């Protein structure tokens, strides 16, 4: 049989062209997509975003308001070189730090954070100084220095350490005592615990009391660290926004830093109510 020639049907059977086969006997490749099953609770929990896992309701007046109705303030402090001190200086620092810890009447959280440093702006600044310099010898030295810094940043991650002290305040004293016995903390932080309320309602008296108490606690910590020889300051609203943004977006924060919304001056057009003059809408 040659290509294109119809096959000879067996005796007693009628020949049927291939394009006239019954639909049930045609070998057709299946292109039907199986129906998708509804997502389970575990699947939805796995797709939970960082926004859903945050326990923060609002940041205002240098105070962090949590979804459970509690409050936080954050104090940042500088480090001191303890290894370069003499034995007498070390003893004084240890004694002062012991006195500072004994003076605390409220819970505190000490946090040490390591963050990758973006040296791109520093290299751009050096390159700008290099172009404005007319001294040939200094120009050659700066080119070598820029090349060294660039190669060092590519081979190793340049890290910076930051030190923070978180000061909580709970409007309910019994809740402050029970927080010491909380279990499954990591499960709650990951969004697997009981979800807090979407809107946190706090009356003015409770808010004023919380801000006053956090102000007192922050001043107590700052003065206590000053006795140790550590300079400390309290983070304001914009600094708190930047801190939590960098914590929850470590990779994005290097490429897209959080801007200061108070410095933005964007013009916008607002649609007026009612018909425009002249009868046009």
Image (cartoon, grey):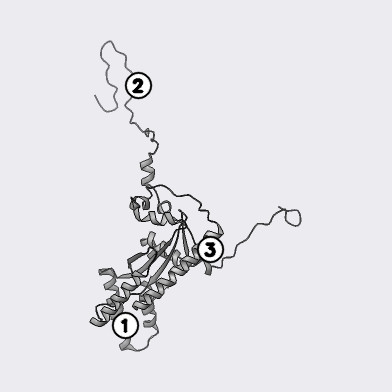
Q: Residue at x 72, y 56 (%)?
A: 276
Q: Position of residue 77 (x, y in %)?
A: 37, 73
Q: Residue at x 26, y 73 (%)?
A: 152
Q: Which of 82 and 45 lies nearest the eye of the viewer?
A: 82
Q: Secondary structure at mark 3?
A: helix
* Rendered position, 248 above or below 128: above
Q: Determine which quarter of the picture holds residue 272.
A: bottom right
Label 1 – label 3 distance at C-alpha: 55 Å
- Does residue 257 appear in this view? no
The label nearer to you, 1 versus 3, is 3
The label nearer to you, 1 versus 2, is 1
Q: Which of 46 and 149 lies nearest the eye of the viewer?
A: 46
Q: Is residue 46 left or right of residue 236?
A: left
Q: Position of residue 29 (x, y in %)?
A: 33, 31
Q: Which residue is mark 2?
A: 24
Pointer 1 and pointer 3: residues touching (CB < 8 Å)?
Answer: no
Q: Residues within 10 Å of mark 3 (few under 14, many from 20)?
A: few
Q: Which residue is mark 3?
A: 208
Per the rendering, the mark at residue 142 is: 1
Ranked by sequence position, the earlier of labels 1 and 2 is 2
Q: Which of 54 and 38 lies nearest the eye of the viewer?
A: 54
């Amino acid at each position: 049989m040659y290509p294109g020639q119809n096959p000879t049907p067996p005796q007693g059977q009628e020949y049927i062209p291939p394009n006239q086969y019954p639909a049930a006997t045609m070998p057709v490749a299946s292109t039907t997509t199986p129906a998708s099953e509804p997502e389970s609770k575990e699947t939805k929990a796995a797709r939970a975003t960082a926004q859903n896992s945050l326990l923060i309701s609002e940041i205002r007046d240098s105070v962090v308001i949590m979804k459970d109705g509690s409050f936080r303030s954050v104090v940042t402090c500088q480090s001191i070189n303890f290894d370069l001190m003499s034995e007498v200086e070390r003893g004084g620092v240890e004694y002062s730090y012991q006195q500072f810890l004994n003076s605390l009447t409220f819970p505190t959280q000490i946090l040490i954070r390591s963050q990758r440093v973006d040296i791109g702006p520093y290299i751009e600044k050096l390159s700008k100084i290099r172009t404005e310099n007319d001294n040939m010898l200094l120009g050659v030295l700066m080119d070598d220095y820029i090349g060294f810094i660039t190669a060092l940043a590519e081979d190793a991650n340049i890290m910076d350490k930051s030190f923070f002290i978180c000061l909580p305040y709970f409007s309910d004293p019994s809740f402050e005592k029970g927080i010491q016995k909380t279990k499954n903390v990591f499960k709650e932080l990951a969004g697997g615990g009981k979800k807090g309320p979407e809107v946190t309602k706090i009356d003015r008296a409770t808010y004023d009391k919380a801000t006053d108490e956090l102000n007192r606690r922050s001043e107590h910590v700052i003065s206590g660290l000053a006795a140790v020889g550590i300079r400390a300051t309290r983070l304001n609203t914009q600094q708190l926004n930047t801190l939590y943004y960098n914590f929850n977006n470590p990779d994005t924060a290097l490429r897209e830093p959080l801007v200061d919304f108070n410095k933005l001056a964007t013009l916008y057009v607002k649609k007026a109510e009612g018909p425009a003059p002249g009868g046009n809408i």
